[in-house]
Image (cartoon, rainbow, N blue to C red):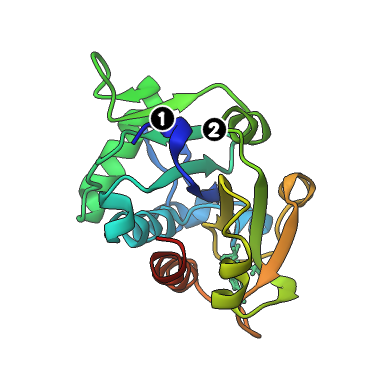
Amino acid sequence: MKKGQKKIWIVLFDSNLELLNNELLDVSKHFRKMRQEDLGRRGRPDITHVGILNVCDFPLYSRGEVGLIIHTIENKIIFVKDSWKPPRNYINFSSLFSQLLKFGQVPPKGRPLLFISNLTLKDTLSSLRIKKIVLLSSHGNNVNLEQYLTSLKSSTPIAFLVGAYAKGRPRNEILKISDEVISIYDKVLTTNVVLSMLMCYLEKVFL
Ligand SMILES: C[S@@+](CC[C@H](N)C(=O)[O-])C[C@H]1O[C@@H](n2cnc3c(N)ncnc32)[C@H](O)[C@@H]1O
């Protein structure tokens, strides 16, 4: 299935993927170099790693029915080639994404598995002709996920935005492009639990 034909896109937004001296900024390593106000928002590439695995391990992704877009805290958009298998090991993930941020694609030459696009998130989603953008947030309207997804079956292509950071409300730029903000549980959940629940119900309801 081609990118333009996918019914469902998962967007990991504000992913903490940025370089410091050619390696991924990581709070566990670079704590002293980080500003207090950035803690919670930056320096957690591990959240993106686990999030990517949570999406790509589902059969929906392996069958090419769900697409993955990684938006970074620096507003870069990363596309992944269909059937790309992410590294399971964090050290390998970290060196792959450092290379991606440095060269704009991996492998650096030839047909890329991953590449950075120059479009904004809004333009990326409109280029994919997304009909509805749903932001998942603990501050959204409470929904029963299964019923909610069932009600969306005729609104495809659809994009689900899930934050890949530790703390804080979604930024205004993200809120502004979202058509709806939904909460799927009455407390804050981790990115990986939200993605697992979403993928699980998408598998059940949509396909
Ligand atoms: C650790 S949370 C970030 C915290 C932030 N307070 C929030 O919920 O927007 C990471 C991401 O998980 C998702 N999330 C967390 N709790 C959620 C909930 N109860 N309902 C829907 N999405 C949730 C959001 O997409 C969020 O950006």
169 left or right, relative to 27: right
Quadrant occupied by the N terminus:
top left
Taking the spot 42% from the left edge, 54% from the top edge, the residue there is 48
What's under tag 2, amino acid-wise? Lys
Taking the spot 46% from the left edge, 69% from the top edge, the residue there is 205
Label 1, label 2: how many angstroms apart (C-alpha)? 9 Å
Which of the labelled discs sits on residue 152, or is there none? none
Residue 39 spot, x, y in % from top left: 59, 60
Residue 178 spot, x, y in % from top left: 73, 50
Which-is-in-front pick, marks 1 and 2? Answer: 2
Taking the spot 46% from the left edge, 62% from the top edge, the residue there is 206
In the foreground, 93 or 201: 201
Residue 131 spot, x, y in % from top left: 66, 43
- Residue 14 visible, this orientation: yes
Where disc 1 sits, the SS reads helix
Is the C-beta separation of discs 1 and 2 under 8 Å? yes
Tell which circle, 1 or 2, labels the residue nearer the N-terminal end.
Answer: 2
Quadrant occupied by the C terminus:
bottom left
Which of the labelled discs sits on residue 76, or is there none? 2
Q: Residues within 10 Å of mark 1 (few under 14, many from 20)?
A: many
Position of 157 relative to 192 (above/below):
above
Q: Residues within 10 Å of mark 2 (few under 14, many from 20)?
A: many
Quadrant of the rendered image containing residue 187: bottom right
Q: Which residue is mark 1?
A: 101
| Residue at the top extreme of this rendering | 110
Q: Quadrant of ligand 1?
A: bottom right
